[in-house]
Image (spheres, coloured by chain):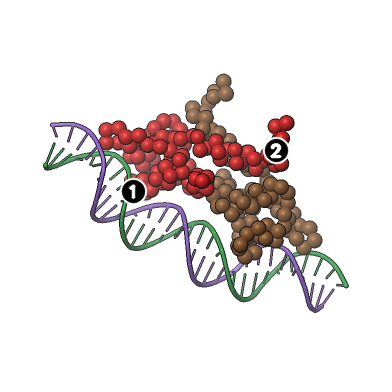
Chain colours: A red, B brown, C green, D purple
Amino acid sequence: MAFAETFKALSDPVRRQILELLKKGPLSAGEIGSHFEMTGATISYHLKILKQADLIFESREKNFIYYQLNTTVLEEIMLWISELKGGNSDDEGK
Amino acid sequence: MAFAETFKALSDPVRRQILELLKKGPLSAGEIGSHFEMTGATISYHLKILKQADLIFESREKNFIYYQLNTTVLEEIMLWISELKGGNSDDEGK
DNA sequence: GGGGTATTTAGAATTTTTTCTAAATACCCC
DNA sequence: GGGGTATTTAGAAAAAATTCTAAATACCCC
């Protein structure tokens, strides 16, 4: 279960900001990096964590690697939170 | 903005499990602790973090402290994730 | 193939988080 | 008030996360 990994990945502000950048469309690692005051190596580290959490995926083009959002895992998170809010879990929706 | 704090709080498996326990109703610190192989001090540490993140609140009774879920902050998280999924954010719901 | 750019990997330093033990509070009830 | 239970705080140790620099890959294009 990569569930725990997803929450961990979402816990860092830099990574959340990366996701927000990717919301508008795919970006290369370099383009992502240009939004932060960090070395490319550090950005790469964060991208790796997001990738392992299945929150992003990459596609290679020329000698760039483009990253984009993978929203499917977010559904799971939403569901978990939903159930937490839901309370008695069963028959909430009647 | 306690937003970042909330994500951080949710990133730990023990804390998520505590929230799940509280889903069924209020529990004292001791009762919560009995579900884990950890000292009371450690549980107290996790409760403090959840409290600071506004994910739980306490009410004192006799010489127990009962903790319960506060779901209001979860709405914010849901919203953030929702918007991330939503894509172009505006007019998604038509 | 070779120079050039983009990105990642390795390893180390720093910071943050998690956990423990021991001690301190807080509150109850006789 | 004093013994007793419940919980937290303080401080230290251990583990994990974040960041950097330097080096390594990967891939393009001439």
CA neighbours of label 2 inside 10 A, class few (<14), some (14 to 19), many (20+): few
C-alpha separation, residue under disc 2 versus residue under disc 1: 46 Å
For mark 2, name the chain: A
| Residue B59, position as x, y percentages in the image | 74, 54
Foreground: B58 or D26? Answer: D26
Locate residue B36: give its quadrant: bottom right
Q: Is residue B72 visible?
A: no
Foreground: A56 or A34? Answer: A56
Task: Please name the amino acid that badge 2 sits on.
Answer: Asp
| Residue B88, position as x, y percentages in the image | 49, 27
Residue at left offset 49%, top offset 34%: A71
Q: Is residue B71 visible?
A: yes
Label 2: state its secondary structure.
loop
Mark number for residue A90? 2
Label 2 vs 1, first from the N-terminus:
1
Q: Are marks 2 and 1 on the same chain?
A: yes
Residue at left offset 73%, top offset 31%: A94
Mark number for residue A41? 1
Locate residue A66: give its quadrant: top left
Q: Is residue B27 above or below residue C29?
A: above
| Residue B73, position as x, y percentages in the image | 63, 43
